[in-house]
Amino acid sequence: MASIFSKIVAGDIPAERLAEDDRFLAFLDVRPIRPGHSLVIPKQEIDHFFDLPDDLLGDLMVFAKPVANAIRTVTGAARVGCVVVGVEVPHAHLHLVPVDGAHDIDFRRATPAEPEELAALGERIRAAL
């Protein structure tokens, strides 16, 4: 059965897409820790992040770099943290979270975002890319 992320890749579930190529997709998290919290995924459905082939793993980070820089620019955060948790969806993914300190990466603080908020923020991040 396809993961929710594979359904997003296929267009079966809407997402605020930030960047995309033939192998990767970056989109805003619908339950962000902080505004700008995004996910970067390989389009190929592989469950465990560190099961990704080395070239795909390295290229995912290269793909994520301009997305992270755009998130930092738009949000004004001091940094963009990278987090791999990998328990909530059986599809490898990297969280990009704008942070001003270690306390900003607390998944217990995640709350649903309004679609309008995601659309406006997505537009600003895409423009910064």
Image (spheres, rainbow, N blue to C red):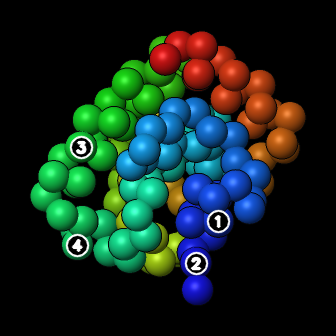
Q: What residue type is labelled 1?
A: Lys
Kindly identify which numbered label has been placed on residue 7: 1
Q: Pick whichever of labels 3 and 2 is earlier in the sequence.
A: 2
> What residue is pinned by disc 4?
51
Residue closer to the observer: 9 or 30: 9
Give the percent coordinates (x, y) of residue 113. 77, 46
Badge 3 marks a residue whose secondary structure is: helix
Q: Pick whichever of labels 2 and 1 is earlier in the sequence.
A: 2
Q: What residue type is labelled 3?
A: Asp
Q: What residue type is labelled 4?
A: Asp
Q: Pick whichever of labels 3 and 1 is earlier in the sequence.
A: 1
Give the percent coordinates (x, y) of residue 10. 63, 59
- Whole-angstrom CA distance, mark 3 to mark 2, is 23 Å
Badge 1 marks a residue whose secondary structure is: helix
Badge 4 marks a residue whose secondary structure is: helix
* Residue at figure coordinates x 70%, y 55% from the top left: 11
Residue 93 left/right relative to 115: left
**Mark 2–mark 1 contact, CB under 8 Å?**
yes
- Whole-angstrom CA distance, mark 2 to mark 1, is 7 Å
- Whole-angstrom CA distance, mark 3 to mark 1, is 22 Å
**Mark 3–mark 1 contact, CB under 8 Å?**
no
Kindly report which numbered mark, 1 or 4, lies closer to the viewer in this rendering. 1
Residue 26 left/right relative to 62: right
Count of numbered circles on the image: 4
